[in-house]
Amino acid sequence: MGRSPCCEKAHTNKGAWTKEEDERLIAHIKAHGEGCWRSLPKAAGLLRCGKSCRLRWINYLRPDLKRGNFTEEEDELIIKLHSLLGNKWSLIAGRLPGRTDNEIKNYWNTHIRRKLLSRGIDPTTHRPLHQPLSDITISFVKQEERINEEKEKILRCPDLNLELCISPPFQEMNNSHHVEPVMKREEGDQGFTLCFTCSLGPHKSQGCKCNNSSSTVVLGL
DNA sequence: AAGGGATACAACCGCTCCTCG
DNA sequence: TCGAGGAGCGGTTGTATCCCT
């Protein structure tokens, strides 16, 4: 049972791509566009899985890729975006033209992680290392005050160009509320709108059935 | 010069999300 | 409304290269 494999594994190459394979892939995409990745390998005469072709094109062959070392500005931007978005590498990559999610993810794990650790900052939480748990307080009484602080903190990053508006969560929470934030660009929108009332998901999207616009975060990503 | 550990990054894997019939 | 299939994402692995002893 289960899903059929994305390709005939027995007849596909794996590992590093050869120059000839690259050339075939580039030529095919130039001629026909990206289209359906699943059928692309056969059409291009490649013994590769569609996923492999997609990855190779997106991360290495695309003509608009920047390549080369990350600048200090890019470093700082990645750190700021990661502190806001977490491991949402594709979203972070969207703010860095010419950089791919895979490239940023690798760069984070090899360089930035170490850089933050050397600064005494936890790369996961972006808090000082060895901060005792007792120092982290969870308060619902001062919630509004705390949200305003967060709002100010984020707005102090004008270089991120994130249009943000944060309001207190809706009071009457019930068990159906999710915890994990989900972001999605709405059609024709200037940014992302997160709904903190019903699902922490996209406001007025599939996951959001409320009309409480006061509990949203708009991220102009 | 050799070899062994560390590092960097390309590529793979498995899962979730999204779309469409 | 539901399920199948394709696309996309994030975590992990494999391997080439670098560096130190």
Image: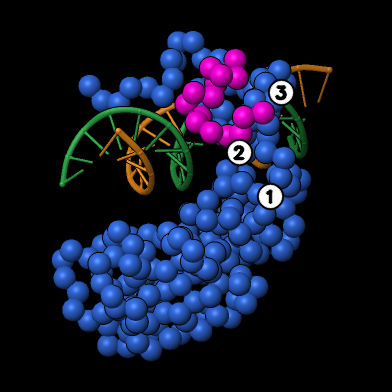
Chain colours: A blue, B orange, C green
Picture coordinates of residue B17, whole percent (x, y): 36, 48
Q: Earlier in the sequence, mark 1 or mark 2?
A: 2
Q: Earlier in the sequence, mark 1 or mark 3?
A: 3
Between A104 and A99, the one lying in front of the other is A99
At x 55%, y 72%, the residue is A162
Mark carried by residue A41? none
Picture coordinates of residue A119, whole percent (x, y): 62, 65
At x 50%, y 31%, the residue is A36
At x 47%, y 26%, the residue is A38
Whether residue A39 appears in magenta in the rendering, the answer is: yes
Task: Name the element at disc 2.
Answer: helix
Distance between mark 2 and mark 3 Cα atoms: 14 Å
Residue, disc 1? A98
Between A156 and A112, the one lying in front of the other is A156
- Report whether mark 1 lies on the same chain as mark 2: yes
At x 26%, y 62%, the residue is A178
Distance between mark 1 and mark 2 Cα atoms: 10 Å
**Quadrant assignment for the C terminus of chain A:** bottom right
10 Å neighbourhood of mark 1: few (<14), some, or many (≥20)?
A: some
Mark carried by residue A58? 2
Q: Which residues are magenta?
A: A31-45
Q: Is residue A13 visible?
A: no
The total number of labels drawn is 3
Residue, disc 3? A23
Amino acid type at mark 3: Glu
Distance between mark 1 and mark 3 Cα atoms: 21 Å
User: In the rendered image, which quarter is residue A23 located in?
Assistant: top right
Between A33 and A78, the one lying in front of the other is A33
Q: Is residue A45 visible?
A: yes
A13, above or below A122, in the image = above
